[in-house]
Amino acid sequence: MSDTNLLGDYLRARRELVHPESVGLPAGGVRRVPGLRREEVAMLAGISSDYYLRLEQGRDRNPSIQVLEALARVLRLDDAATDYLLGLATPRPRHRRRRPRRETVPASIRQLLDVLDLPAFVEGRYFDVLAANNLARALSPNLQVGQNRLQAVFLDPAERAMYPDWDQASAELVASFRESVGSDTDDPRFVQLVGELSLSSERFRQLWARHDVRSCEGMPTRIQHPQVGELTLSREKLAIGGAKDQLLVIYHGQPGTSSAEKLALLASLASPTATSRPRRDAPANAAPEEPGQV
């Protein structure tokens, strides 16, 4: 990825993923590159080959919305990917060097986490975990302050083992991450994170090179939990008012399903009072406390 030619990098990556037959072109013949040729994209979008070449090479950075929408149609982009493409072509100020931003979770959101009886946590723009409740930590030890969801999924074998559909889950995570970042790629945290993952994970390098952009909120995720077994959970992301780029993430199971029952069991196991043994400061014959809510 080139920080100076984000638009060209994206166009090149996406055209290489489009099969000629999917846009009505013959698939036969010898092709030196996968996907569509530059001249084919230009023809289908109704622009000159020379102009499209300038876009990919970064020699023209101000295409019209009409041109971008035509390219999005040819490249088979959905709404989220089209918005991402439009954002790449929007001029933005350049800074010599940016300082890392301090991300502070509002006190009211921390209080909300404590009373929710579902796994919930707050993530920053680069998928850093900024706050989490007990049930989120019980769902995954990596859902705690100071951890990063990308690093966990790609670099922690124990986290990877929790996803029976790891290939799909990891692809969705990277596509969602790219949507979250957009064109803001000069932040030191972004540079450090993508650099580390690119060096440490071949799978991440492959997915990052695809330039997939996708919103994955509400999509079911299968999790193989070491204590309660397999769960199928949906994940919702809610914007936090007054906290720029922070999202409240909540996992939930469909009511009446075994996953919902297992989640309730996990909640009881995660409760500080859920234990069959008496506390050290309690009489030996004291009755066990009732499980509390997270």
Image (cartoon, rainbow, N blue to C red):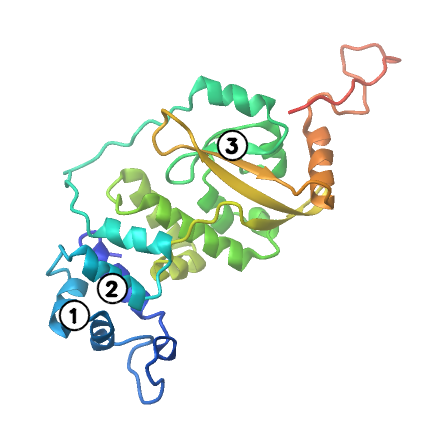
| Local crowd size for mark 1, using a 10 Å CA cut-off: few (<14), some (14–19), many (≥20) | some
Q: Which label's residue is closer to the chain start, 1 or 3?
A: 1
Q: Which quadrant of the structure image shows residue 26?
A: bottom left
The residue under label 2 is which amino acid type? Ala
Q: Which residue appears at 22% of the width and 57% of the height?
A: 7
Residue 121 pos. (x, y %): 51, 32
Image mark for residue 47: 1
Is residue 196 among what the camera can see? no
Q: Quick one: 128 or 245, which is closer to the camera?
A: 245
Q: Classify mark 3: residues with Cα within 10 Å, few (<14), some (14-19) or many (20+).
A: many
**Location of residue 117 (image quadrant):** top right
Pick the residue in front: 35 or 73: 73
Mark 2 vs mark 3: which is more N-terminal?
Answer: 2
Q: Do the residues labelled 2 and 3 touch (CB within 8 Å)?
A: no
Q: Viewer-nearest of labels 2 and 3?
A: 2
Residue picked out by circle 2: 70
Q: What is the three-letter code of the residue carrying label 1?
A: Ile
**Which numbered circle lies on residue 121?**
3
The mark nearer the N terminus, 2 or 1, is: 1
Please identify the residue farthest to the bottom as the structure is shown.
Answer: 29
Where residue 263 appears, as percent x and y from the top left, is 69, 38
Secondary element at tag 2: helix
Q: Distance between the residues labelled 1 and 3?
A: 46 Å
Mark 2 and 1 residues: CB-CB less than 8 Å, in contact? yes
Residue under the point 74% across and 35% down = 265
